[in-house]
Amino acid sequence: MDWGAIFENGIQAGFGVFAIVFALAAMGLNVHFGYTGLLNFGQVGFMAIGGFGVAISVATWGWSLWAGLGVGLAASVVFALLLGIPTLRLRADYLAIVTIAASEIIRYLLRSPEFRETTGGSFGLTQFARDFYRLNPFSDGRYGIGPLKYGERTFWVIVVGWTLVAVIAAIVFLLMRSPWGRVIKSIREDEDAVRSLGKNVFVYKMQSLVFGGVCGTLAGFVLALSTSSAQPDSYSTPLTFFAYVALILGGTARVFGPIVGSMIFWTVLSLTDNVLRQADQKDYLPNWLIQGTEVGQVRFMLVGLALMLLMIFRPQGIFGDKRELALDAR
């Protein structure tokens, strides 16, 4: 097998577009779950709002890219308010139920035939990223260092994406060391104690939900602009759980935990996929065990097994702390 190509593809995946998308989504979940103790299972809903916010604004309404980005951010704030107002005063599991249902409602609304003229229906929308790529300062060619070489369009997305990741990481770092961040972490530990000190727990939770949702919206922007398409079924529930995998892998309540976790997650997925495909092509694997069409499913099985072992022997993740996993779910 070509181990050089296997490791090169793995490294590229670890720094690629999907690693950026899930790093941003997982950073939002880190604010929700890691720091505040909010069980948000609908982060993909915020991603869909971001992707379709810019797609509908540009492709359907003919607005500018910047207006589309503003629409996506504003819609994500409204979505967070609609989710939080009826649920944040209740137990944590109610938020989990509402968010996962709300994300599916959004997906079905986007693919509904009744809204096809606006959303494109099940086919989605395309041709809305031209203004973004017109800003690309890189001419035709491949850019990067060593094995990290990408085409000029992908490299532009990666530069913008990792810049967003760095900015959000810096904001989270500063916020969690501010008085606001200390209150947020106290709510995770014991919200009744925080309430007894005169703090409005509901308002702090809502602020956390909005900020983490905006991070998910940024992930949706990057995903939609990188592919120049927004298709409803691309924003399905498993994306939220992939983001949780990245978060738990890196470690909750750590600024760099979701970033490193996302990079490792996509590196491992790429490595297992390439190893299995090349082994199948070389007939190293018997047909009764695995076939080429089953590689996509088997790689997730292997990654799931590795995650199970991680949860058994190091449940706090690579950089996490066991004490950060304790939640006040009352």
Image (tube, grey):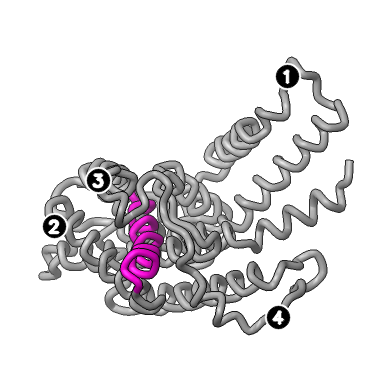
Magenta region, residue range: 41-62
Q: Is tag 4's residue or tag 3's residue first in the polypeptide sequence?
A: 3
* Horizontal and vertical percent position of residue 13: 67, 56
Figure label count: 4
Q: Give 295 or 33, whichever is nearer the viewer.
A: 295
Q: Is tag 3's residue or tag 1's residue first in the polypeptide sequence?
A: 3
- Of tags 2 and 3, which is closer to the observer? 3
Q: Is tag 4's residue or tag 2's residue first in the polypeptide sequence?
A: 2
The label number, if any, that marks residue 52 in the structure image:
none
In this picture, is 290 found above or below 182? Answer: above
- Of tags 3 and 1, which is closer to the observer? 3
The label number, if any, that marks residue 114 in the structure image:
3
The label number, if any, that marks residue 289 in the structure image:
1
Magenta stretch prevailing secondary structure: helix
User: Distance from label 4 to label 2 (Cα)?
Assistant: 48 Å
Measuring 83% from the left and 32% from the top, which residue is drawn there? 281
* Horizontal and vertical percent position of residue 207: 24, 68
Asked if the residue at tag 1 contacts the one at tag 4, i.e. Cβ–Cβ closer than 8 Å, the answer is no
Q: Is residue 199 left or right of residue 226?
A: left
* Horizontal and vertical percent position of residue 155: 66, 71
Kindly tell me whether residue 254 is visible in this rendering.
no
Measuring 71% from the left and 60% from the top, which residue is drawn there? 12
Q: Which residue is mark 2?
A: 85
Q: Is tag 2's residue or tag 1's residue first in the polypeptide sequence?
A: 2
* Horizontal and vertical percent position of residue 265: 60, 50
Amino acid type at mark 4 = Ser
Measuring 31% from the left and 60% from the top, which residue is drawn there? 36
Q: Which residue is mark 4?
A: 139
Which structural element holds mark 1?
loop
